[in-house]
Image: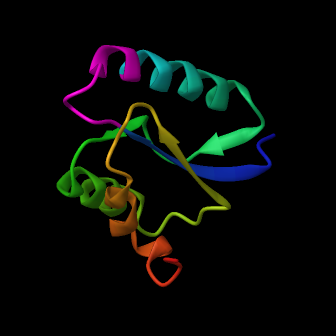
Amino acid sequence: MPTSTVGFVSLVRPTFDTTLAGQLTQQLWAQLVESDLQPVDDCNMIISSDQAQSVVDKQRGKPLDLLLVFQASFADSTHILDIPVLQGHRR
């Protein structure tokens, strides 16, 4: 039985190797699915703030024990700050 619910996002930069980033993301996603963790959504790759907002909208109302952010390439990690759970926790 799953022990923790996990939100998952993979940050990808479109000017780098997106094919490799996708492969790495899929490998990590497969390990999450096989673990005791319960992912709350699909495998999400984020390239833009709009995509980050889309993920937020899909996961809204789903309580998370953990938000796993995977930087699959040299990506602009500021997109992750668009996720409301992290607002107010910026340093």
Q: Over which residues does the magenta segment extend?
A: 12-21
Q: Is 49 within the magenta?
A: no
Residue 71 rendering spot, x and y as whole percentages: 47, 39
At 58% from the left edge and 26% from the top edge, which residue is drawn? 28
Q: Which of 14 and 34 lies nearest the eye of the viewer?
A: 14
The main secondary structure of the magenta stretch is loop
Q: How many marks?
A: 0
Q: Which of 70 and 75 lies nearest the eye of the viewer?
A: 75
Q: Which of 64 and 71 lies nearest the eye of the viewer?
A: 71
Residue 69 rendering spot, x and y as whole percentages: 52, 48
Quick check: 75 above or below 81?
A: above
At 51% from the left edge and 40% from the top edge, which residue is drawn? 70
Within the image, what quadrant is residue 72 found in? top left
Quick check: 31 above or below 55?
A: above
At 49% from the left edge and 77% from the top edge, which residue is drawn? 90
Residue 57 rendering spot, x and y as whole percentages: 30, 62
At 34% from the left edge and 41% from the top edge, which residue is drawn? 75
Q: Quadrant of the N terminus?
A: top right
